[in-house]
Image: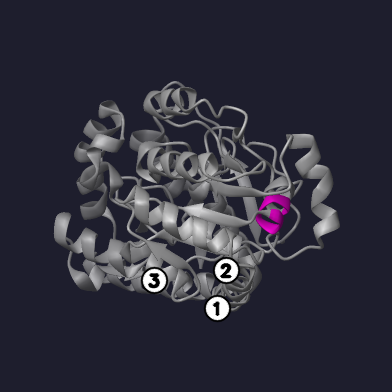
Amino acid sequence: MHIALDGMPLNQQLTGVGHYTLELARALAAASANDQYEVVSPLSFVPLEEGNLNGELPNLRFVQAKVGVVSRHWWTVGLPRYVQKRSFDVFHGTNFEVPLWKKCATVLTIHDLSLLLHSHAHEQSRVRRARRRLPLMARAATMIVTPGESVRDEVIEHLKIPATQVVAIPEAARRVFHPMPPDATSETRRRLGLADEFLLYVGTIEPRKNLNKLVQSFVEIARARKGSLQLVLAGREGWLTEELFELVRQSGMNEAIKFTGYLCDDDLRALYNSCLAFIYPSFYEGFGLPPLEAMACGAPVIAGRIPSVEAVTGSAACLIDPDSVSDLAVNIRDLIDNERRRRELSTAGLKRAAEFSWERTAELTRAVYGEAMARFAKAK
C-alpha cells in the first residue's frame, strides 16, 4: 500500500492531534515494511524533540509539498493534485479534513464532536466552520476512524453516517511516558518553581477542560489545609480563558496556582512522576490521552466520569461528577490524605496503561485502510 497522511498537525507545537499523527505514522511504518507512508503538508514541519523526521524508518517520509498561486489552496486544489500525482492508495485525514476530490480512498479521523455538541465552549467562528465542514467531510470519506466507542456513536447519530463506515480505534500513551526515580524529577520542579506537593493538570487551557471547577475545588482545599500545596496547570493557552484567569486572580492564590505554559515531554514526564495526583475534570473528551499518560508514569488519577474517559481508565482512576465542585474537592482531599489509596491507583494505572499500544492502533488502522481501498474500488 502507498498511504498519505495529513501532516498539517505537525506544523505547530504538538498537542493531541499532532502526537496522534506522528505516533500513528511511525507505528504504521514500523509494522509494515512493505508499505510506503508519506506525511505531507504545504507548510514546514515544526522541529520535534525526537530529532530529524526523515531517516528513522526507510518507508516513512515527511514531505513539504511545493505549492504555487493556485495549489496553495491546499484542500481544494493543491492536495487533490498532489494525491493524483503520487498515486496514493489511501489518504488519511488525521485532523477532521480530507480532500473532496475523490482521487483515492480516504480515511477521516474524527477525534470528537465537541465543536458541535458543546459549542458554548468554543469560539463561534470555529463552531460555524465545523458546522459547515465536518458533515461534508464525514460524507466524503470512504471510512471514518474515531478514538473510542462514544465518539463513534456520536458520529453515527449526529452526522448520520452508516455504522459500517465508522470504526473505533483506541490510542495509547507514548513511550516517553514511564516511571522514573523521584530524584530525577527534582531539577524540573526546581526550574519551574514547584513545591514538593502539587496537583497536576495537563492539556490545553480551554473551557471544556472544566478548569474553573478544578480551581474552585483547589481553593476550597488549600484554604483549609496547612502547607504549600500547589495546583499546576500545564499546557498552552487556548480560547475563552478570561473567566478562568479572573477566577484565579480573585482567589488570591496566584502563587499557589501555577500556569506553566506548553512543556516539553521530558518536563511533562517529570511532573507526571512527582505529582500527588493528576486531575482531569473535563466534561467532554474524544479519548483522553493525558490521563493515560499520567497512569503510564504511575500517577494516581482523578478524572471526570464521562464515557470516553471511563473507557480509557477503567477501574484504575477515581472518577468524579465533573459538574460538582464538592465531589471533586472531597475526592482530591481524600486522595492526597491517603497514601495507601494513591499507591493502589498508581499500581492499577500502570497496568491499565500497558493495555494500550501504538502497535495495536497501527494494526487496526491498517485494516481500515484495506477496507477503504476495497470500498473505493467497488464504487468506481
Crowd band around label 1 with a 10 angstrom C-alpha radius: few (<14), some (14–19), many (20+): few
Crowd band around label 3 with a 10 angstrom C-alpha radius: few (<14), some (14–19), many (20+): some
> Which residue is disc 1 drawn over?
355
Q: The residue under label 3 is which amino acid type?
A: Ala
Q: Describe residue 256's horizontal placement relative to residue 6 as left or right.
A: right
> Which residue is disc 3 drawn over?
311
Asked if residue 19 is among those painted magenta in the image, a careful observer would answer no
Q: The residue under label 1 is which amino acid type?
A: Glu
Q: Main secondary structure of the magenta part?
A: helix
- Mark positioned earlier in the residue sequence (3 or 2): 3
Q: Nearer the viewer, residue 290 or 72?
A: 290
Q: Quadrant of residue 74?
A: top left
Picture disc at residue 68: none
Q: The residue under label 2 is which amino acid type?
A: Trp
Q: Residue at x 67, y 64 (%)?
A: 297
Q: Nearer the viewer, residue 249 or 25?
A: 249
Q: Describe residue 312's horizontal placement relative to residue 57 as left or right.
A: left
Give how far across and how far down residue 27 sits, in percent: 61, 66
Numbered range of the magenta stretch: 270-274
Give the quarter of the figure containing the C terminus: bottom left
Q: Nearer the viewer, residue 81 or 271?
A: 271
> Which residue is disc 2 drawn over?
358
Crowd band around label 2 with a 10 angstrom C-alpha radius: few (<14), some (14–19), many (20+): many
Q: Determine whether label 2 and label 1 are within 8 Å by CB.
A: no
34 relative to 202, above or below: below
Task: Tell us which disc is closer to us: 2 or 1.
Answer: 1
- Mark positioned earlier in the residue sequence (3 or 1): 3
- Residue 362 visible in the current orientation: yes
